[in-house]
Image (tube, rainbow, N blue to C red):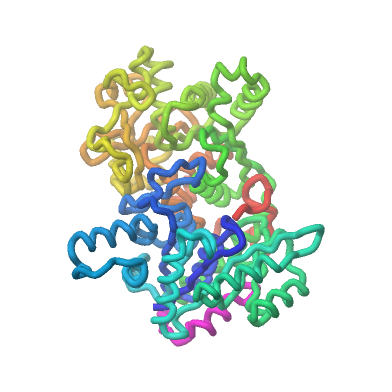
């Protein structure tokens, strides 16, 4: 097993996840099998109970694991399927060590950070790195390990020590480290001292970086590269300049142009690994398509404008997978994506008095958008604004996509406006717990009295219902399929007692779970695109395989749903991007620079 450790210094949040994913993608283009592990040195067992306004989105895996959003980057870039074991937290490690101590596994010894905690970490990495993660069902050749936070953080020191032990136990050509640093600019001068001190800190901790990836807003000057190489004692070619790119999808190309593949090959002796011709050909094709896709988007001039009505807009990463899924769909439709973020509270009636400017601006964005998306979320805050947005979309034939809470919002709005079901019944138990008679009710088995890991989580089947061949969404999935599998994360569901009334008025539940009791998908027949899904399709969207609900939504907003639907049922994906080849991009979202 070969290991590539990606660590960070100076400051956090400079793009370790994108650099780790990009390095993994480049390895896959060689035909290698690549896995990935994310280390988060917080004491939480997982990310499930964290506030998205502080930590960003919670990413859900097939096995129901609630993980750091970087695992989404790995899955999207590497096209692999990870498990909860691929996200290591200090909470998980402490829990395991204490469990072993209580069981008597340490035979009366004093349990210490070294060697017991560090040994548990190293064993975890070695075990999980060998688990197959792709369709070959074979042990990976290389594992990318991303160490969250920055070297020197007190909560991460046990992980640093464990990785030092892992490096010592590996052969020299089985372990390499890429250390990501930040180059600030002060009065126009690129400063290298923070990077020098960061490398000194890493080495004093026992790790020895092989490559230094320098994050910077503009290309590094040659004098800066020379200075970093000289004072950090590495060859000049081992200093990688990772400047801000128009799109994060172009970072692998930037790293490839700086010879990252030859550098990793020579350090890890990758040329000694036997690679099957089929995987080599697949890797070559993926790289050619990736380059074609990411370098040609500047020449897309037709814009599709989507409004995202959310409640966690303070943190840009709160809806990261949703944004990425919209990007994937827009690429497939050959449209430039423009997302306008609207605070759901700004759409509520009370805002018209407290902040009229925000109220009118929010409604202007909603009323002029080509499509309206209401994503998942928790709690009562902003839900009346979401209901108002869903009503506008339904009545004015604006394409609408509701995800999880967004689907429940659409059902509540329909119950109020079309079925004339009064309040408080036409609401959710999540918003009003006075009694159980609500359109949206709680799932009792997912309310055991504690929050962590108790929702309806992971990959689950949805069965298409009889006489739903008219469905636009089903056509995208393929009418020949009787069921689909998507990832879930929710505690509440549509009340079965109200289904007959809702369907009589025209709201069709075209997808249900295996029991036929849980409602999974709604769709309006006489609407350009009005779809709500209880699951989170964004977790399975890939750069070259867009999520079907997002693809249909964006295609409908762009006025090309029929064309895209026919393409999904017979046109080769590579052919979609051929005409874009060889051009540079100004960005995927709003023409802005990518934020790592």
Q: Residue furthest right?
A: 187
Q: Residue at x 41, y 76 (%)?
A: 165
Front-most of residues 502 and 595: 595
Front-most of residues 74 and 30: 74
Does residue 532 appear anywhere in the picture?
yes
Front-most of residues 570 and 455: 455
**In this rendering, position of residue 488 left or right of residue 254:** left
Front-most of residues 3 and 568: 3
Find residue 199 and report its horizontal and vertical position in percent. 60, 72
Predominant secondary structure in magenta?
helix
Q: Residue at x 42, y 45 (%)?
A: 537
In magenta segment, residue 273: yes
Above or below 318: residue 523? above
Find residue 143 and report its horizontal and vertical position in percent. 42, 71
Image quarter in which the N terminus is found: bottom left
Residues drawn in magenta: 255-278
Does residue 573 appear anywhere in the picture?
no
**In this rendering, position of residue 399 left or right of residue 124:** right
Q: Residue at x 34, y 60 (%)?
A: 93
In magenta segment, residue 437: no
Above or below 64: residue 264? below
Image quarter in which the C terminus is found: bottom right
């Amino acid at each position: 097993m070969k290991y590539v450790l990606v660590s960070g210094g100076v400051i956090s949040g400079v793009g370790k996840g994108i650099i780790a994913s990009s390095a993994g993608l480049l390895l896959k283009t060689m035909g290698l099998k690549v896995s990935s592990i994310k280390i988060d040195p917080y004491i939480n067992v997982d990310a499930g109970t964290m506030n998205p306004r502080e930590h960003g989105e919670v990413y859900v895996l097939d096995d129901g694991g609630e993980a750091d959003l970087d695992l989404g980057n790995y899955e999207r870039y590497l096209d692999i399927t990870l498990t909860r074991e691929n996200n290591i937290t200090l909470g998980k490690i402490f829990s395991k060590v204490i469990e072993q101590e209580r069981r008597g596994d340490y035979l009366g010894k004093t349990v210490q950070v070294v060697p017991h905690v560090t040994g548990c970490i190293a064993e975890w990495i070695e075990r999980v790195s060998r688990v197959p993660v792709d369709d070959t069902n074979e042990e990976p050749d290389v594992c990318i390990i991303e160490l969250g936070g920055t070297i020197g953080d007190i909560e991460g020191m046990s992980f640093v020590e464990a990785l030092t032990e892992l490096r010592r136990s590996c052969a020299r050509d089985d372990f390499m480290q890429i250390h990501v640093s930040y180059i600030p600019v002060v009065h126009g001068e690129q400063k290298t001292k923070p990077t020098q001190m960061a490398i000194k800190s890493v080495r004093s901790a026992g790790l020895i970086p092989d490559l230094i990836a320098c994050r910077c807003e503009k290309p590094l000057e040659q004098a800066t590269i020379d200075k970093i190489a000289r004072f950090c004692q590495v060859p000049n070619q081992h200093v990688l300049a990772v400047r801000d790119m128009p799109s994060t999808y172009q970072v692998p190309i930037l790293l490839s142009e700086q010879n990252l593949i030859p550098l990793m090959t020579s350090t890890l002796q990758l040329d000694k690994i036997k690679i099957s011709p089929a995987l080599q050909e697949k890797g070559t094709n993926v790289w050619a398509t990736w380059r074609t896709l990411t370098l040609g988007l500047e020449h897309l001039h037709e814009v599709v404008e989507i409004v995202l009505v959310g409640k966690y807009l303070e943190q840009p990463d709160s809806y990261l997978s949703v944004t990425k899924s919209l990007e994937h769909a827009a690429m497939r439709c050959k449209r430039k994506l423009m997302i306008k973020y609207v605070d759901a509270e700004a759409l509520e009636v009370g805002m018209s008095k407290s902040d009229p400017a925000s109220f009118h601006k929010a409604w202007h964005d909603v009323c002029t958008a080509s499509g309206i998306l209401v994503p998942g979320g928790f709690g009562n805050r902003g839900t009346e604004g979401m209901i108002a947005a869903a009503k506008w979309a339904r009545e004015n034939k604006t394409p609408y996509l509701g995800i999880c809470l967004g689907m429940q919002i659409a059902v509540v709005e329909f119950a109020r406006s079309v079925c004339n079901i009064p309040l408080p019944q036409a609401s959710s138990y999540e918003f009003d717990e006075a009694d159980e008679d609500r359109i949206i009710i709680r799932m009792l088995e997912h309310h055991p009295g504690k929050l962590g890991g108790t929702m309806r989580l992971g990959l689950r089947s949805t069965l298409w219902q009889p006489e739903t061949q008219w469905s636009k969404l089903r056509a995208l999935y393929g009418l020949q399929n009787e069921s689909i599998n998507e990832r879930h994360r929710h505690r509440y569901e549509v009340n079965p007692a109200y289904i007959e009334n809702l369907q009589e008025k025209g709201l069709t539940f075209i997808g249900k779970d295996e029991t036929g009791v849980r409602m999974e998908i709604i769709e309006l027949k006489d609407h350009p695109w009005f779809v709500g899904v209880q699951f989170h399709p964004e977790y399975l969207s890939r750069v070259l395989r867009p999520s079907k609900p997002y693809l249909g939504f964006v295609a409908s907003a762009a006025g090309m749903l029929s064309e895209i639907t026919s393409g999904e049922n017979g046109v080769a994906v590579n052919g979609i991007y051929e005409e874009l080849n060889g051009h540079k991009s100004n960005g995927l979202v709003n023409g802005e620079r990518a934020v790592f």
